[in-house]
Image (spheres, rainbow, N blue to C red):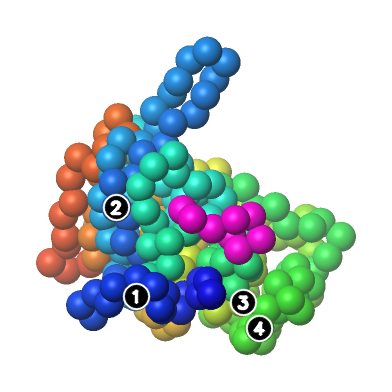
Amino acid sequence: MRSEIGEADPDRPSEPSSSAVFRVRSVSKIYQMGEVEVTALRDVNLELRAGEFIVLLGPSGSGKSTLLNILGGLDVPTSGEVLYLGSNLAACGDHELTRFRREHVGFVFQFFNLIPSLTALENVELITEIANDPLDASAALELVGLGERKHHFPSQLSGGEQQRIAIARAIAKRPTVLLCDEPTGALDGKTGIVVLDAIARVNRELGTTTALITHNAVVSQMANRIIRLSDGQVAEVRSNEVSKSATELSW
C-alpha cells in the first residue's frame, strides 16, 4: 500500500537519519515548445534541511522558479527523484500533489493575490478554515507585524503590508516548508527589508524550512546556505558563517 506523503515508505530501504526535508536527486525538467525542447533543469542534486533559510540565486532562465515549483508540487520533473521526508513527489499523481501542497507547503509570490473584498483577517482565515492544525489567523498577522491592521481591506494597505498579509496567509496552515518566489520584486528597497524581516521571523520562530528566490545577491547575506543556479544546473552551494538580519542589509 502506498504511504502518505511525509510518512515513511515501507517499500523503500531505510536511510541514515538526516535533517533533510527535501532530497533532490538527478532532477531534470524539459519543456516541449512545439517542435523545440527547452531544458529548464539539468541533473540537479541538492538538499533542503529542516529549519534552514535557503536563498536561490541566478539570472532569469537559470531554473530557479522551475526548481521551486517542483519542490512545491506545482510541477513534476521529467526525470529524477524529489524526496519529501522520504516520499517521492515525482511519482505522485495530481490528487496526492494537491494534498501535499495543501498540508505541507506555504507559497509567497511576487504578486500578493489577495481578495480585495475581504479584510486582512478574512484573507488569512480562508486558509485556517481548511487547514488541519492552523495558527489562529490573528496570531499569524501578529507574527508579521500586522495585528493592528487586521480589519483593513487590501486597498487600504501599502504594497509591503499586502505582501505581509500574503505571508501570514501562507504560514497560517503551519507549513513545513515556505517557498518564496521574488517576494520583494514589486517593492522598493525599504519596504522589501520589512517583508524580508517578516519572512525571517517566521523561519526563526516557527522553524519553517524556507527557500527564497531573488535576483538581489544582497539578500543572500540572510541565508544559512546559498544555492546559485546557472543554465539549469547548480553552479555553487555555499554557507554563511553568520547570517545577517534583514535590517542589516543595504541596497
3 vs 2, front mark: 2
Residue identifier under label 1:
51
Amino acid type indicated by mark 1: Gly
Mark 3 to mark 1: distance in Å? 17 Å
Callout count: 4
Residue identifier under label 4:
132
At label 2, counting other C-alpha atoms closer than 10 Å, the crowd grade (few under 14, some 14-19, many 20 or more) is some
In the drawing, what numbered circle is on residue 219?
A: none
4 vs 3, front mark: 4
In the drawing, what numbered circle is on residue 172?
A: 3
Q: Answer with mark 3 or mark 1, whichever residue precedes in sequence.
A: 1
Secondary structure beneath label 4: loop
Residue 95 or residue 47, whichever sits in front:
95
* Side of 117 relative to 59 (left or right): right
> On screen, 46 above or below 197?
above
Q: Answer with mark 4 or mark 3, whichever residue precedes in sequence.
A: 4
Q: Answer with mark 3 or mark 2, whichever residue precedes in sequence.
A: 2
Q: Residue at x 42, y 83 (%)?
A: 205
Mark 3 to mark 2: distance in Å? 30 Å
1 vs 2, front mark: 2
- Magenta segment range? 90-97
Verify CB contact (< 8 Å) between mark 4 and mark 1.
no
Query: Where does residue 235 sit, x and y in percent of width and height?
Result: 20, 40
Q: Residue at x 50, y 47 (%)?
A: 76
Residue identifier under label 2:
25
4 vs 1, front mark: 4
At label 3, counting other C-alpha atoms closer than 10 Å, the crowd grade (few under 14, some 14-19, many 20 or more) is many
> On screen, 78 above or below 157?
above
